[in-house]
Amino acid sequence: MEHNPKATICITTYNRANLIADRSLYSALHQDFDDYEVLVVDHGSTDNTEEVIKSYSYMDKRLRYHKMPVNTGCVTEARNLGAKLAKGKYIVFLDDDNMLYPQYLSETVKILDETHDIQAVGTGRMIRYPKYEDYAPPYSVNEKFISLDWGWLIRRWVFFHLKYDKEVFAYEDTDFGIEFTTYYQFDVINKPLQVAFDDGGSSHSYPTEKHLIAMEKFLYKHLETYNEYPKELRFLYRSYGRRYYMAGHRLKGISYFWKAFWTLPNWHYFKHFIAILFGWTIYDYYMDSQERKAAKLRLKENKII
């Protein structure tokens, strides 16, 4: 009789042969927990990703590899497929350029094993920028708006009920989190058990027209919910403003900055609006200085430094 592992680490990847072995795959295969598998879902890579993964799978039978025939430009489909192919009782998604601490599975699995009314566990995350580090707690302000992206250990049966929505892929993690918290409960470990590397090159930093359409679909889908939480709506509007501005839609970007301020006026958000009026260079400099200060404070508050 085939033994199904307790957990699945599902790595979704696309053309990252140069990174996956040293980051996500290395950390996935070096957990201090025994009963798990590693599933790599290749979203149609055209580089030598398959060759790299198979060179490891020959040596480690915990590793499985599945290649999608084409890249659909939407990570949601790769994640949904990973949930379908996984054999573990629990599943955690891992982006190909990020890492898990060795004790990640042992600490998160323990909570799901012992607490049956909890369906997901999140942990803190270190974020490594080119010039500084930051600490991201499992969720920021409101439990309704958790971002169920990579790094959350989830009971796999949840995916019989919920799926990542490909129509809102620009915010698919928050969309999934809103749907999840409507039905289920979660727990968190407020210490870093993951590492994210942010080089500023994500689709969120440089959105395409396709991403902007998905953003508007997300807003239309959840605006009624956001209206009940003005602080979260204000943050969302500011985020939209930055992304529209970076995509070349300056006036629409500025309008979202104004919406952010007017949703729940305060001096901090007014400074954001004024800074963007002087152009992206001034705004980016202002944001960089603010984020570095905030990062240092978060590291200190969470006793990382």
Image (cartoon, grey):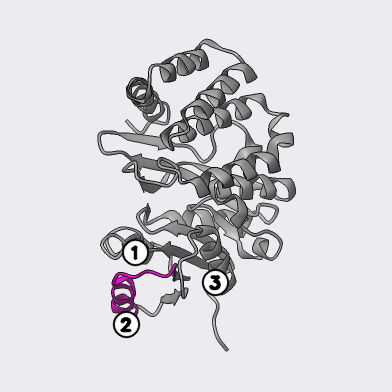
Point out the image quarter for the N terminus: bottom right
Label 1 secondary element:
loop
Count residues near mark 2 (Cα–Cα under 10 Å), then give few for <14, some for 14-19, many for 20+.
few
Count residues near mark 1 (Cα–Cα under 10 Å), then give few for <14, some for 14-19, many for 20+.
some
Residue 165 point in image, percent of width and height? 62, 55
Residue 84 point in image, percent of width and height? 59, 71
237 within the magenta span: no
Residue 184 versus residue 25 in the image, above or below: above
Residue 274 versus residue 16 in the image, above or below: above
Marks 1 and 2, Cα distance to the nearest angstrom? 21 Å
Label 1 amino acid?
A: Asn
Q: Residue at x 62, y 25 (%)?
A: 231
Q: Residue at x 60, y 50 (%)?
A: 168
Tag 1 and tag 2, C-beta contact below 8 Å: no
Q: Earlier in the sequence, mark 1 or mark 2?
A: 1
Label 2 amino acid?
A: Tyr
Stretch in magenta: 42-58
**Foreground label between 1 and 2:** 1
Please tell me which residue lies in front, 31 or 167.
167
Q: Name the residue tied to disc 3.
A: 86
Q: Name the residue tied to disc 2.
A: 58
Please tell me which residue lies in front, 38 or 96.
96
Asked if residue 147 can be seen in this view, the reply is: no
Count residues near mark 3 (Cα–Cα under 10 Å), then give few for <14, some for 14-19, many for 20+.
many
Q: Residue at x 40, y 42 (%)?
A: 206
Residue 15: which disc?
1
- The answer to which quarter of the image holds residue 39 is bottom left
Label 2 secondary element:
loop
Tag 3 and tag 2, C-beta contact below 8 Å: no
